Image (cartoon, coloured by chain):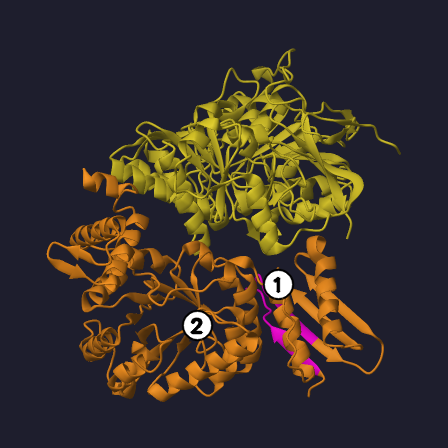
Amino acid sequence: MAEKFTKNAVGRMIPEKINGKPVIPFQGVHKYITDGKRYAPPLSSSANFPEDGNKQVKDLKTALKNAGIKDGMTISTHHHFRNGDLIANQIFQAASEMGMKDLVWFPSASFPCHEPIIDFLKDGTIHHIEGSMNGPLGRFASQGHMRGAGVLRSHGGRYQAVQDGEVVIDIAVIAAPTADSFGNANGLTGESACGLLGFALADSQYAHKVIVVTDNLVPFPCIPWQIQGNYVDYVVEVDQIGIPDRIISGTTRITRSPDRLFIAELTAKFCDEVGIIKDGFSFQAGAGGTSLAIGNYFGEIMRKKGIKARFARGGSNQYLVDMLEEGLIDYILDGQTFDLAGVRSMRENPHHVNTSPFTSYNYHGKGNFAGIVDVVILGATEVDVNYNANVVTHSDGYLLHGIGGWQNCLFSKTVILPIPLFRDRIPIIRDEVTTICGPGELIDVIVTERGIAINPRRKDLLEKTANSKLPIMTIEELKAEGERICGVPEPVKLGERVIAAINWVDGTVIDVVYQVIE
Amino acid sequence: MAHIGTAGNQGPGIRSDCYAALKIKKSGGIKIILNSKVDALYKNSIRDLAQQILDFYKVEHAELEIIDRGAISLVLAARIEAVVKECLESDDEFLLDMILENQHSTEKDHKRRSRLYLPGNSPKLMLNAGIHKPDAVILDLEDSVAPDKKAEARLVVRNSLRGLNFYGAERMVRINQLPDGLKDLEYVVPHYVNLILLPKCETADQVKAVDEKITQLLAEAGLDHPVYIMPIIESALGVVNAYQIASASERVAALAIGLEDYTADLGAQRTREGRERFYARNQLVNAAKAAGIQAIDSVFSDVADMEALREVVLEAKSLGFDGMGCIHPRQIKVIHEAFAPTEAEITKAKKIVLAFDEAAEKGLGVVSLGSKMIDLPVVKRAQNTISIALEAGLIPENWKETEQE
């Protein structure tokens, strides 16, 4: 079948339809402006709900049945339990037992713990996944085994898609570390405490039916109600919703690799030299080992200068919490807590604020926080000579990572990607990246162990470093150095079938991922 | 000769390296079985390289298995050459191009504050060593290489000397104790090594043997750049003979001390206070300085304790040592900071450098400061101090202008 493709604003060929639905190719940053109205789920009437407010049903299967589960429905989950989530697999186990077919799973992210989902993709229970596919699921999809195409969105893009009706959630299942029988819920306490439930906010507001699942049912009221029971249809109590030490796993230790520490230190030096680290600045560094080290170096510089940051964006962890408690940061605006120190701080410290993709990243909001941040530190699997970057696929074509908040963070005032020039002989700087996830015009600086490249669009940064001792190079020079060490990579031949779409923050499609030929 | 050869490293922790196994056969042509982590991007180039090496050694019938974890070409080539040489007798060397950056020699009094040890059979650790800017790297063929891996390590070290950019670090090789070490020299001297570390050195004759072999190898290769020797004194006898060793050859640029073996030789325990090694360190500094060369301290083995390292370096500096060994890249910065000149040293160096400039400007053959004549080596040392101070950001680039105002 001959699909029709059009070239989008970053030169990638985009099919007319994905999963049978028409798509809009990426038109450029801030170019696609939508009108129309927000999507609205059907009205509910409280008369239809128990007068005593007790919405508890006996198990997940009953809740799904009562919610009217049918073939082809879209079922959503959140990823606050990261690799310790026990609920998503149970939902589709139950759905499979009920004989459901062609469901769409709409997680805010998936993890290796969701490998059993492969069985439900194989047996027809699930048609495709719209959400990040990390590890085994991504490999399965890359090999062309998923019937539909995956759709990957950023955290903000997920909110956008729900709000404008691009995705209609039939049933949202919200696993909650603590909840009451009315459906009020939070992530702050309980065995599976994960801090907050921000990724489930859109789901609670827009899904047709909402099920809260908890292993810590408390008498009404569950305070604070991060998720409001007024949106919730059913409450289910189970023995265990998550595995605590996997919920808090992530990368929560500063790297010990001397090479990564070197890159981290160089990044901090760069930020200092160009004047980013000043009193009242703001920053966001991720939870990876290198990012943590950068936060730490920021702290050292702030202490030396006697200054503090107005706010830092989370993911939070021990290191960021220490900085908050030391007085180096006024506020943590947090999207997810990566360890128990983060959970505790959010529970106890009013300066540690829980945020959602709505406040931080949503394209349909009247502004969002992302652009207010002075500097953001992000990763990438590849960057091309035009600074376009990839975070979802590896150079061999495999889809192995999600977008997370990465695209949304690109709107920060300065975007820095600290990355090694090569990983196991694979050069990071390429003529073309395998998959474009972010357009080069939003990416400002690449810091590698062998040099720093500044996007020519950032004349200000180039001027500030003109007489610097920092190893400033052009991106072409960096690429040449990488290829001199590793050799020039051979072109990778990929299949013709589109196995996933990469959406931009506004809902347009910036690139697609092709099947891998093994 | 064996018909099966193996070389390299494999296993879960291995990266940027490969394992090769070669089976020589009587017929059937060449079969290359490649299992590479970077297959999608480099399978053709790896196969081509392997074929090229087999052709070079005229291997016509064989099965070559390569388990590759992202090794760069020079590592792959070293591994494949190693397995071929296990299977057949050949003195031919399969050499990849030598990069321009590595075709330079150093000065006898090159800055040698830090020298980073890199195990000779672990290419992963060599790849990024240069980015940490040690004054020198040591590609080690001695203690860090298992006895049955010596032959293959020589090839990795040789190929790295030729093809790996160490970003300006002086390129040193620690050879094995003599007589094995003399064989090691054949693999490194023709490939622009800057300095040879001679371990467990006890007599001037050992130095002379190395000197002669270096001279011979350079002549055979048609090269005449300087290759220095740094004997490592690691025994009581070595300490006693330190001055003879230091002055045994023009090539000796520095004396180093190895304290682990030395204390064992004394039958003493290594203590934190270090009284048991105080004599040896002083004697070594004294012998080195008497011979007009540098004195280099041992390594500090607790890689997590940067404060203790700083103390040890400050002590070494106060005793007269010019440098120290490092076993982890994070130690380099601490060592450089601790060896940085003090304010008084900088002030003195500035005066000497300015006096030298003035003399040069006036075309005077003699540099003098006040009524004192200044020897050229003193000027050189002062220039060195200034360059270190500049590099450490202790004085501004334009210090001469501000100084003369």
Evaluate whether residue A222 shows in this view: no
Q: Is A414 or A1 nearer to us in this picture?
A: A414
| Residue type, numbered disc 2 | Val
Q: Chain of mark 2?
A: B
Which image quarter is the C terminus of chain B in?
Answer: top left
User: Could you tell me residue A290's position as x and y percent?
Assistant: 45, 47
For the residue pair A167 and B264, the one nearer the viewer reads as B264
Q: Which mark is residue B97?
A: 1
Mark 1 closeness class: few <14, some 14–19, many ≥20 residues within 10 Å: few
Query: In the image, what residue occupies the spot 25% across and 43% down?
Result: B400
- Report the residue at 38% width, 60% height from top: B135
Residue B9 lies in the magenta stretch? yes
Total count of labels? 2
> Viewed as shown, does residue B113 lie left or right of B157?
left
| Chain colored yellow | A
Q: Which mark is residue B227?
A: 2
Q: Nearer the viewer, residue B30 or A219?
A: B30
Secondary structure state at the residue bearing disc 1: loop
In the image, the chain rendered in orange is B
What is the three-letter code of the residue carrying label 1? Answer: Asp
